[in-house]
Image: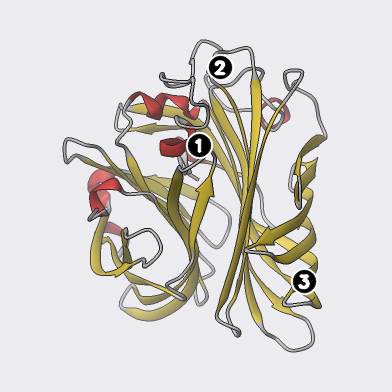
Amino acid sequence: MVRFLNCLFLISILSSCVSPPSLESDVFYDRADIQRDEAPHVANSLEWWYATGWLNDVETGDTFGIEFVVFHFSMNGKKDRLLSNVAITDVSADRFYFDHTLVGLEDQLEATLPLQLSTDHGKSKASMSGKFGEYSFIANADHEGESFYYSLKTKPNSPVVFHGNNTGYEDYGGYAKAGYYSYTDLITEGEIEVDGKLRKVKGSIWYDRQWNCGSVLQNRTTGWDWMSLSLNETNEKMMLYRLRLKEGLNIYGGTLIHKDGTYEALKGDELQITDLDYWKSDNSGDRYPSSLAISIPHENIELELKMLKEQQELEIKILPLVKLYYWEGMCEVNGTRNGVNVTGRSYLEITNPENREN
């Protein structure tokens, strides 16, 4: 998953930090190795373990979206910090809950497995553990004084996908390069609690592992659209992105995963992502594409993504009087594949400065 997500606000995490993270400790190999790269990379500029998914109440069938991410970053190659973001979208109740926690570590993270990552501050706690698709995600969080919670366990239902033409290193138009692989279908079971109700849930989670991402901070105006898509009728999946630079340059790419588990890289000239409509947040004043057209002509794919719920904007409070925003949430998919109608589900992330009106 491209997931340079909150890089824009990471620069401002510490008032004393006026430079992007140091890249000196970033590591590059000819090919990613899950045995090595699942673990933390020591003093990495910016890396993350990221999960988003669609879950259903096993009794009522009600649909929920889930987000869990732990960012690990080092601004100077010496001091490590972890930032967690957690969220639940309650579709039937038309509610969105989110929270975040930032902690400084006394010691640098070591390259060990299984993963044991956690953040804990006040009412907000988040943790993940495990390796190679078998994970535990736990969040005890607070949204505007209202608590929410989830505890989920996963196991892989399909092989790992190495992005970047099977190398595990995605090259974003020569602008930046980062390690990247995904589990696109983790069978998930557990429980969530929102509005004081504890529910048993099950479904599927898309998991991303990315590292060496601090390079994008060298340009502080960069924004991203990132999306995961799952088509119901063909059982195909896609990771797509649009990197937006200040100069007006858009860089496109992604990976198409076929039903049989084989996959192929999508080059920038093979992919078109076009804004169709917008939603403006009353909270931030920012606007975001509320629907997107996806065209992959050589694969005869024409899709439209539409926000399932508009208010899935997250507000990040790191410094006093500083609030930063991004949108990430559930989207529905409709369109055609080889001329036949298809439907699907998606998670979309938007951090595009050029869409801001204020």
Q: What residue is at 77 percent from the left and 45 percent from the top?
A: 128
Find the residue positioned furthest to the bottom: 60
Where's residue 58, x and y in %?
78, 82
Picture mark count: 3
Mark 3: amino acid: Glu
Q: What residue is at 67 percent from the left and 18 percent from the top?
A: 42
Q: Residues within 10 Å of mark 1 (few under 14, many from 20)?
A: some
Location of residue 88 by image quarter: bottom right
Q: Is residue 328 above or below residue 81?
A: below
Label 2–label 1 contact, CB within 8 A? no
- Secondary structure, mark 1, is helix
- Judge whether residue 69 can be spotted in this image: no
Mark 2: amino acid: Val
Mark 1: amino acid: Asn
Which of the numbered marks, if any, corresponds to residue 193?
Answer: 3
Which of the numbered marks, if any, corresponds to residue 166?
Answer: 1
Question: Which callout, 2 or 3, points to the residue nearer the camera?
Answer: 3
Work out how far the residue at label 2 is from the one at label 1, CA to CA, in angstroms.
18 Å
Question: Which callout, 2 or 1, points to the residue nearer the camera?
Answer: 2
